[in-house]
Amino acid sequence: MSQFDGSNSDRGGQRPESSTPRLICIGDPSLAPATHDSLDVVPVRSASEAFDELECGDVVGIWIARDQLPQIGEVRGIAQSGAMLRDMPEGVALLDADMRVLWANRRLLKWAGRDEQTPMGMNFYALLGEPEIMGPDFCPFHTALAIADESNSTLHTADNRYFQVHAAPIHYPDATKQLIVTVGDITDEIMQQQKLAAIHQAGRELADIRPAEIFMMEVDERIELLKDNIRHYLSDLLNYEFIEIRLLEHATGNLMPLLSVGIDQEAADRKLLAHPQGNGITGYVAATGVSYICADVVNDPLFIPGVQGSRSSLTVPLILHDQVLGTLNVESPEPHAFGDTDLQFLEIFARDIALALNTLELLVAQKANTAQQSCDAIHSAVAMPVDEILNDAVNLMEDYIGHGGEMADRLRRILQNTRDIKRTIQQIGQKMTPLEAVPAGSRSPQDEVLRGQRVLVVDADEKVREDAHQLLERYGCIVETASKGDEAVLMVRGLGSGESYDVVISDIQLPDYSGYQLMLRLGERMDRVPMILMQGFGYDPGHSIVKARQNGLHPKGVLYKPFRLDQLIDVVRTILLANQPELAEGCSDAVPDPAKKQQNETSGAS
């Protein structure tokens, strides 16, 4: 029998080859049972040495002297601690200084696919299939041993799982170094972080249109690109198969379809309003601005079917600057298919969609505004020269009246072509800036009464004539100007058969005669002169206004310089309605509205 001097014991488990079964003894081997005569007794000093000897397969048992036993309570605590470690929801392992596994609990072995068989001596990384070390510490075990403190890292396995590893060193009195390692499965957390990052990236790319693309693409093409991007990210990133997006028309409350994927055509074409009752969940969300999870359509009175066999839905508002722009709805054939995580992801993406829609609207409005400004600038540049051509042409016509008919016909064609030039510029501007492409608050005011009405402005001041073009043409009027009374008379005479000016605005004092005298001369050619006279405050040396009123001037047909835009528009509308009562039919705004007057004044000021 070996003596209790540890001569046959070795920490590495190495010993001379022997065919005799061995009994490990912790304590005095002379006190061991009598059966030890047929065994090779191997005395050790501690339980740690005993476990080292167990690595050899010929050990039949361990004998512990009574004086080496711990207290019964301590033994029970050790047993309970072992049971708790074994069944913990996190992985736990004991490693030696070479990162070899000495013990692992059930959870870690399950994650490693080891069926609860502890792979004694196996490298920890090999146990988990050589995962990728993502940091922050790329060698947490060596670091923990080197600095005698805890260290952390994240592992990514081949089956796309993520584990958080925490290593803490254990130092024994005999200088043995071991590591307690806890392992947590953070796959769901990492996946959510990655998904959130992908959603934010997708949101940035929704309206990421470069200047060259903006220049080359029409409005409809940009809308289709945005719809394709939304469809792609909702389907491929968020895995939604049934999608519907509607945009809210704030003026009418209609929810207009923008995009539908997998939605029944009848449901996609259904008219819905932003109202909490009778318009489904979409109408409720648009009216309240609050997201809505329908867990089971069977038990939800708000739900209106959009997909055959749909059992649950999730609807979120598209909100920008606290204003609802529309709704985003997804559906599933499974009940209770959407939870708080789905709601969070969809609300985040909905904000990005709202921003993209706003960016697109800004691009469209900016393009429309630029086109409108360009046309206005062109029209402003040619308006006065065109008037000069008209004035010269009608003067020349006077010289050829009664003479060569061919020359008079040519002059009439010049007049017509000159007027067509102005009209063409206006029409091009309207086509380049359609009303639906311009926000309601930025649209040029198109008055139902003023639109298409022909106005002649007579004033020696060129600035007044330029302002007449700029202001009245914004309201749809066709404006021509003259600098003195004789030119105005010739302009009226030069109109074709059946044509006339709907309003004539004249200064009370022209270079050749007064506004009242102009009114009389025009009366020789017009059954009723739709006259408006302009004067400075208190300036009417010839009493033109008094005389004009005595000869048919409308009581409100006077403008006092300087006048505001709303005053000009109101007087022009009054004269038009007085001379053309039929304009009031079908016109909801025939009587000037003070609120609208203020709005028009503001528009003019801007």
Image (cartoon, rainbow, N blue to C red):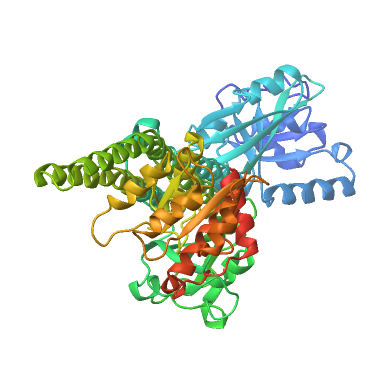
In the rendered view, tell whether residue 346 sits above or below residue 74. below
Q: Is residue 402 left or right of residue 392?
A: left
**Quadrant assignment for the N terminus:** top right
Q: Does residue 292 sit above or below 210 in this rendering?
A: below
> Residue drawn at (44%, 43%), measured in percent from left and top?
469
Q: Is residue 573 above or below residue 181?
A: below
- State the residue in front, 59 or 294: 294
Q: How many marks?
A: 0
Q: Nearer the viewer, residue 129 or 55?
A: 129
- Residue 226 position in % (x across, y down): 40, 48
* Residue 93 location (% of width, % of height): 65, 38
The answer to whether any part of residue 447 appears in the image is yes
The reply to whether residue 1 is visible in this rendering is no
Q: Nearer the viewer, residue 275 or 65?
A: 275
**Is the C terminus in the top left, top right, bottom left or bottom right quadrant?**
top right
Does residue 177 appear to the left or right of 238 in the view shown? right
Give x and y (percent) for residue 431. Answer: 33, 49
Q: Position of residue 131 (x, y in %)?
A: 50, 33
Left or right: residue 409 versus residue 166 is left
Determine the residue positioned at 45% across, 77% down.
Answer: 305
Frontmost residue, 106 versus 412 = 412
Residue with the most extreme front position:
542
**Residue at (60% x, 61% y) in the render:** 596
